Image (spheres, helix red, strand yellow):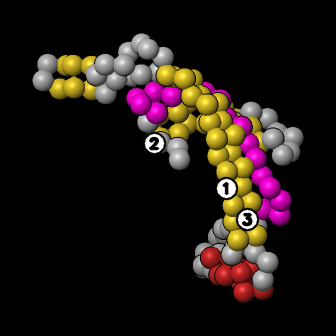
Amino acid sequence: GSRAAALRGSLQYTSPFLRNPIRVKTLFLPAIAPGFSVGVQSGWADAPTTAAREAINRLDRFYDPRLLASRAPVARPTERIRASVTAGFRFFGNGLFAGVTRPVDQAAAWTLLLGFGQQW
Protein backbone atom coordinates (compact mmCIF):
# COMPACT_ATOMS: atom_id res chain seq x y z
CA GLY A 1 0.00 0.00 0.00
CA SER A 2 0.92 3.63 0.05
CA ARG A 3 -0.41 4.69 3.47
CA ALA A 4 0.07 3.05 6.87
CA ALA A 5 0.07 3.84 10.57
CA ALA A 6 1.14 1.85 13.62
CA LEU A 7 0.85 2.45 17.36
CA ARG A 8 2.29 0.31 20.14
CA GLY A 9 2.36 0.63 23.90
CA SER A 10 3.35 -1.61 26.78
CA LEU A 11 3.67 -1.75 30.54
CA GLN A 12 6.54 -3.80 31.88
CA TYR A 13 7.69 -4.83 35.32
CA THR A 14 11.14 -6.31 35.81
CA SER A 15 11.54 -8.20 39.06
CA PRO A 16 14.54 -7.53 41.33
CA PHE A 17 15.50 -11.23 41.18
CA LEU A 18 18.17 -12.84 39.01
CA ARG A 19 19.44 -9.51 37.63
CA ASN A 20 23.14 -10.37 37.79
CA PRO A 21 24.97 -12.20 34.99
CA ILE A 22 25.63 -15.87 35.60
CA ARG A 23 29.31 -16.82 35.79
CA VAL A 24 30.38 -20.26 34.58
CA LYS A 25 34.18 -20.45 35.08
CA THR A 26 35.48 -17.76 32.69
CA LEU A 27 32.22 -17.45 30.74
CA PHE A 28 29.48 -14.96 31.63
CA LEU A 29 25.91 -15.80 30.64
CA PRO A 30 23.26 -13.05 30.51
CA ALA A 31 21.09 -12.44 33.54
CA ILE A 32 17.72 -14.17 33.43
CA ALA A 33 16.04 -10.97 34.71
CA PRO A 34 12.39 -12.14 34.61
CA GLY A 35 9.59 -9.63 34.22
CA PHE A 36 5.91 -9.29 33.34
CA SER A 37 4.59 -7.39 30.34
CA VAL A 38 1.21 -6.35 28.92
CA GLY A 39 0.86 -4.46 25.67
CA VAL A 40 -1.42 -3.24 22.94
CA GLN A 41 -0.61 -2.94 19.24
CA SER A 42 -2.68 -1.25 16.57
CA GLY A 43 -2.17 -0.66 12.89
CA TRP A 44 -3.78 0.26 9.61
CA ALA A 45 -2.69 0.02 5.96
CA ASP A 46 -4.39 1.30 2.82
CA ALA A 47 -3.92 1.18 -0.94
CA PRO A 48 -6.17 4.04 -2.12
CA THR A 49 -4.97 4.23 -5.71
CA THR A 50 -4.91 1.79 -8.61
CA ALA A 51 -1.11 2.08 -8.76
CA ALA A 52 -0.79 1.07 -5.08
CA ARG A 53 -3.07 -1.95 -5.58
CA GLU A 54 -1.11 -3.00 -8.68
CA ALA A 55 2.15 -2.76 -6.72
CA ILE A 56 0.71 -5.08 -4.07
CA ASN A 57 -0.43 -7.54 -6.74
CA ARG A 58 3.07 -7.60 -8.26
CA LEU A 59 4.46 -8.83 -4.93
CA ASP A 60 2.57 -12.08 -5.50
CA ARG A 61 3.80 -12.77 -9.04
CA PHE A 62 5.79 -15.99 -9.04
CA TYR A 63 5.40 -19.26 -10.84
CA ASP A 64 4.87 -22.42 -8.81
CA PRO A 65 2.52 -24.93 -10.48
CA ARG A 66 1.81 -26.65 -7.15
CA LEU A 67 0.40 -23.44 -5.62
CA LEU A 68 -1.43 -22.05 -8.64
CA ALA A 69 -4.90 -23.09 -7.43
CA SER A 70 -4.44 -21.92 -3.82
CA ARG A 71 -2.54 -18.65 -4.24
CA ALA A 72 -3.11 -16.01 -1.60
CA PRO A 73 -1.86 -12.43 -1.73
CA VAL A 74 1.42 -11.75 0.03
CA ALA A 75 0.11 -8.41 1.30
CA ARG A 76 -3.22 -6.60 1.35
CA PRO A 77 -4.80 -3.49 2.85
CA THR A 78 -6.24 -3.99 6.33
CA GLU A 79 -9.57 -2.32 5.39
CA ARG A 80 -9.89 -1.05 8.99
CA ILE A 81 -7.83 -0.39 12.10
CA ARG A 82 -6.56 -3.70 13.50
CA ALA A 83 -5.56 -4.13 17.16
CA SER A 84 -4.31 -6.85 19.48
CA VAL A 85 -3.23 -7.25 23.10
CA THR A 86 -0.39 -9.30 24.56
CA ALA A 87 0.46 -10.52 28.04
CA GLY A 88 3.35 -12.62 29.19
CA PHE A 89 6.80 -12.85 30.67
CA ARG A 90 10.07 -11.29 29.50
CA PHE A 91 13.53 -12.64 30.13
CA PHE A 92 17.17 -11.67 29.44
CA GLY A 93 16.70 -7.90 29.51
CA ASN A 94 13.55 -8.05 27.36
CA GLY A 95 15.36 -10.17 24.77
CA LEU A 96 12.86 -13.05 25.03
CA PHE A 97 9.07 -12.84 25.35
CA ALA A 98 6.82 -15.82 26.11
CA GLY A 99 3.10 -15.18 26.45
CA VAL A 100 -0.26 -14.99 24.75
CA THR A 101 -1.90 -12.63 22.27
CA ARG A 102 -5.42 -11.95 21.06
CA PRO A 103 -7.00 -9.57 18.54
CA VAL A 104 -9.44 -7.11 20.07
CA ASP A 105 -11.03 -5.84 16.86
CA GLN A 106 -12.70 -9.21 16.20
CA ALA A 107 -13.72 -12.34 18.06
CA ALA A 108 -10.79 -14.75 18.34
CA ALA A 109 -9.11 -17.06 20.82
CA TRP A 110 -5.89 -16.43 22.72
CA THR A 111 -2.83 -17.88 20.98
CA LEU A 112 0.70 -18.53 22.19
CA LEU A 113 3.36 -16.00 21.25
CA LEU A 114 7.14 -16.29 21.42
CA GLY A 115 9.18 -13.24 20.53
CA PHE A 116 12.88 -12.44 20.32
CA GLY A 117 14.49 -9.03 20.60
CA GLN A 118 13.35 -5.66 21.84
CA GLN A 119 9.98 -4.27 20.84
CA TRP A 120 10.01 -0.63 19.75
Within 10 angstroms of label 1, few (less than 14), some, or many (20 or more) residues?
A: few
Q: CA distance from mark 2 to mark 3?
A: 24 Å
Q: CA distance from mark 3 to mark 1?
A: 9 Å
**Disc 3 marks which residue?**
45
**Disc 1 marks which residue?**
6
* Residue 24 is one of the magenta-drawn residues: no
Q: Which residues are magenta?
A: 78-94
Q: Position of residue 97 (x, y in %)?
A: 52, 33
Residue type at mark 2? Gly
Q: Position of residue 69 (x, y in %)?
A: 75, 71
Q: Position of residue 73 (x, y in %)?
A: 71, 69
Precedes in sequence: disc 3 or disc 1: 1
Does 75 appear above or below 91?
Answer: below
Q: Position of residue 120 (x, y in %)?
A: 53, 47
Q: Nearer the viewer, mark 3 or mark 1?
A: 1
Residue type at mark 3? Ala
Residue depicted at 69% across the width and 75% down the height: 2
Choose top left, top right, bottom left or bottom right for residue 16. Answer: top left
Residue type at mark 1? Ala
Res 118 visible: yes
* Residue, far right: 107
Q: Secondary structure at mark 2?
A: loop
